[in-house]
Amino acid sequence: MSGRRLLEIASNSVASALAAQAGGADRIELFDNLAQGGTTPSRGSVAVARDRLRIPLFVLIRPRPGDFHYDAQEAEIMLRDIESCRQLGCDGVVIGALTVDGDIDAALCRELVAAAGPLGITFHRAFDAARDLPAAMEQVIGLGCQRILSSGGAASAMDGRQTLRQLVTRAGDRIRIMAGAGLDATNILAVASQSGCTELHASAKTPRTSAMRHHNPALVGLENDWVQSDTAQVSALRRALDQMGVRIHNIAPD
């Protein structure tokens, strides 16, 4: 399958976002707490990212790690975070919520979409935790989201690529399915071609080692090394996707 492929990089910091931009990413999803599946980054992180990025910036709206069923207080936090993203000039937000029975929480999600106003909307991997993916996709389409980030309900997009293809076929031109989870330069081409997804999502992360010369041995776990998106890995992802078609330039936010 030929055509243009968009590369979104999941960035757990401003440093990751800038490294991703330098490597050829088309869009950034900014978040915090990568090890716990991602939570909403600080207002300061969003503000600095918006100031320094030249490519579209989407921000994860997730008030805590864990499941995707939220109470009224958590809903208020998400609504305020979306308001902040609008104020800071972000291009979009990444949302998702489920009922206790594993359906899309349409009532809450409608509130979140309404709060986002003109911002683009990605429905995140809460989708993969839904009990019926085709039915969940129809609900997300009804909300007016532009895309769904999904691994096809599997541990990785590679494992779920056939389900992703089924979702892409069912969706038609009503919504985009963005493949994500476990993508790297060795498998992104296979996932893109076999799933039919035209948008791909990866973190391109690499370990970073602390520059501190002094460490208090009593604080094991407090001064751990961390991971960050790597420009070279992003470039490798971009080159792999470019084998399938023309690279996307100047992606307009949606």
Image: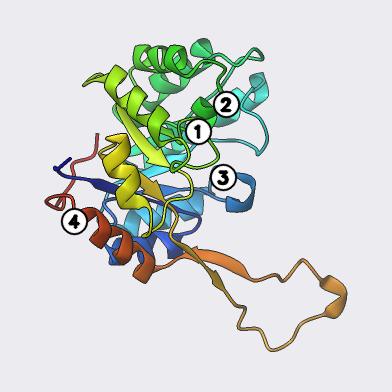
Instruction: In the rendered view, tell whether residue 159 sits above or below residue 208.
Output: above
Label 2: element kind: helix
Mark 2–mark 1 distance (CA, rounded to whole Å): 7 Å
Find disc 2 in the rendering and name its residue. Answer: 129
Identify which residue is drawn at 46% across, 16% down.
136
Q: Residues within 10 Å of mark 3 (few under 14, many from 20)?
A: many
Mark 3–mark 1 distance (CA, rounded to whole Å): 11 Å
**Direction from residue 240 to residue 178 in the image, left or right:** right
**Mark 1 or 4, nearer chain start:** 1
- The residue under label 3 is which amino acid type? Gly
Mark 4–mark 2 distance (CA, rounded to whole Å): 32 Å
> In which quadrant will I find the C terminus?
top left
Mark 1–mark 4 distance (CA, rounded to whole Å): 27 Å
Find disc 4 in the rendering and name its residue. Answer: 243
**Mark 3 or 4, nearer chain start:** 3
Number of marks drawn: 4
> In which quadrant will I find the N terminus?
top left
Find disc 1 in the rendering and name its residue. Answer: 125
Q: Which mark is residue 84?
A: none
